[in-house]
Image (cartoon, rainbow, N blue to C red):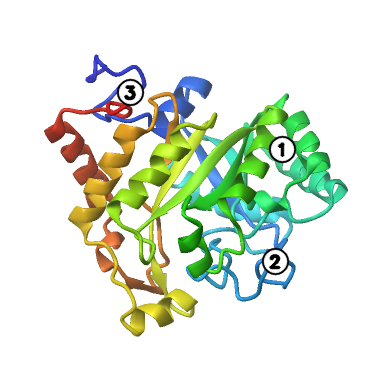
């Protein structure tokens, strides 16, 4: 029974357009992502755009929970899916290329890899994470072709619209770069999911809200809101240990996320409201380990305010 009668994109107590709601409406049953690793690298690691990667990125290129890149796609899929089946038996799957920049190769190689993923058992779509500066006309033509026959989403890491912050994080990537890639994808009819990070050093809550508001003005399919994690072995960890910034407190983060949800149009799917950091590598904030608590607090704060996604538009 629907509990939020005044909100069109929920059939439970959520006051935002959740990914699980969207997938259930589209496919009629449980769907989960299976993170795989193509090991394509990143231009911000190999010197093409920069070296060392983004300050917050782990040694595994933010693919800490994905498959073993030394194994083929089918083997990775079977291994990761076996773990997930124990939790969601019989669900449909979306192969998810998460680690690194998954359009960072030639179009012919990418076609072979993407087609292999789409041929996997119970695969009903494809999610591809990348940088906007790893896209061109030929690759977007390929992605547009795939989007015409499957549920394809390309996830673009923006993190912030503020170029000063991006430069400090060694993104080697500007908001203008992001917009060029985004526009090319939309030109070819590809669904775009935008990643943003809350708590980046030097950013105020108002700056984080500005990022969400700007993203909300774009013609996008979905958003992922991440909490900044300080992970061992990263440049960010060195900054943290030198006392150059502090991480957000849980109550601060919850308030900022709720502010952002109120600024995002209700049609935009919210794929994530916090991030998962490898518990063995996480330095701060340690409260992020209790993901369920964070999500419950967001639900409670939206209810306390009496607001829904998009209410401030």
Q: Looking at the rendering, in which quadrant would you find the N terminus?
A: top left
Q: Callout 2: few (<14), some (14-19), or many (20+) C-alpha neighbours within 10 Å?
A: some
Q: Looking at the rendering, in which quadrant would you find the C terminus?
A: top left
Residue 49 — which label?
2
Taking depth in this image into account, of 170 and 91 the one nearest to the observer is: 170
Residue under pointer 3 = 10
Decide which of tag 1 and tag 2 comes sooner along the chain. Answer: 2
Describe residue 71's horizontal placement relative to residue 288 as left or right.
Answer: right
Q: Which residue lies furthest to the right in this view?
A: 108
Q: Residue furthest bottom?
A: 242
Residue at figure coordinates x 47%, y 68% from the top left: 56
Q: Position of residue 215 (x, y in %)?
A: 47, 38
Taking depth in this image into account, of 154 and 10 the one nearest to the observer is: 154
Image quadrant in which you'd find residue 122: top right
Q: Position of residue 167 (x, y in %)?
A: 53, 66
Q: In this view, does 268 lie above or below 103?
A: above
Residue at figure coordinates x 66%, y 71% from the top left: 50
Q: Callout 3: few (<14), some (14-19), or many (20+) C-alpha neighbours within 10 Å?
A: some
Q: Is mark 1 on a helix, strand or loop?
A: helix
Residue under pointer 1 = 118
């Amino acid at each position: 029974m629907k509990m939020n009668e005044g909100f069109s994109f929920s059939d439970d107590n959520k006051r935002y357009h959740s990914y699980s709601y969207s997938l259930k409406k589209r496919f009629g049953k449980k769907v989960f992502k299976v993170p795989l690793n193509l090991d394509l690298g990143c231009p911000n690691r190999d010197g093409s755009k920069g070296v060392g990667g983004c300050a917050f990125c782990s040694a595994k290129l933010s693919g800490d929970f994905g498959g073993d890149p030394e194994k083929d796609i089918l083997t990775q899929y079977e291994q990761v899916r076996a773990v997930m089946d124990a939790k969601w038996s019989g669900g449909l799957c979306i192969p998810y290329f998460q680690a690194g920049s998954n359009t960072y190769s030639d179009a012919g190689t990418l076609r072979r890899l993407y087609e292999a993923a789409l041929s996997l058992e119970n695969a009903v779509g494809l999610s591809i994470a990348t940088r906007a500066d790893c896209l061109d006309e030929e690759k977007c033509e390929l992605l547009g072709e795939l989007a015409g026959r499957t549920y394809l989403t390309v996830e673009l890491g923006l993190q912030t619209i503020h170029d000063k912050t991006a430069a400090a994080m060694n993104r080697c990537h500007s908001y203008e770069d992001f917009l060029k890639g985004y526009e090319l994808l939309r030109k070819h009819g590809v669904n775009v999911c935008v990643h943003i990070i809350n708590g980046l050093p030097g950013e105020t809550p108002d700056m984080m809200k500005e990022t969400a508001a700007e993203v909300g003005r774009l013609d996008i399919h979905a958003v992922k809101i991440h909490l900044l994690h300080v992970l061992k072995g990263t440049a960010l960890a060195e900054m943290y240990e030198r006392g150059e910034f502090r991480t957000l407190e849980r109550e601060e983060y919850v308030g900022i996320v709720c502010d952002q949800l109120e600024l995002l149009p209700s049609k935009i799917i919210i794929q994530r409201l916090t991030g998962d950091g490898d518990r063995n590598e996480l330095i701060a904030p340690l409260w992020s380990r209790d993901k369920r608590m964070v999500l419950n607090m967001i639900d409670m704060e939206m209810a306390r305010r009496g607001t829904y996604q998009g209410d401030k538009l």
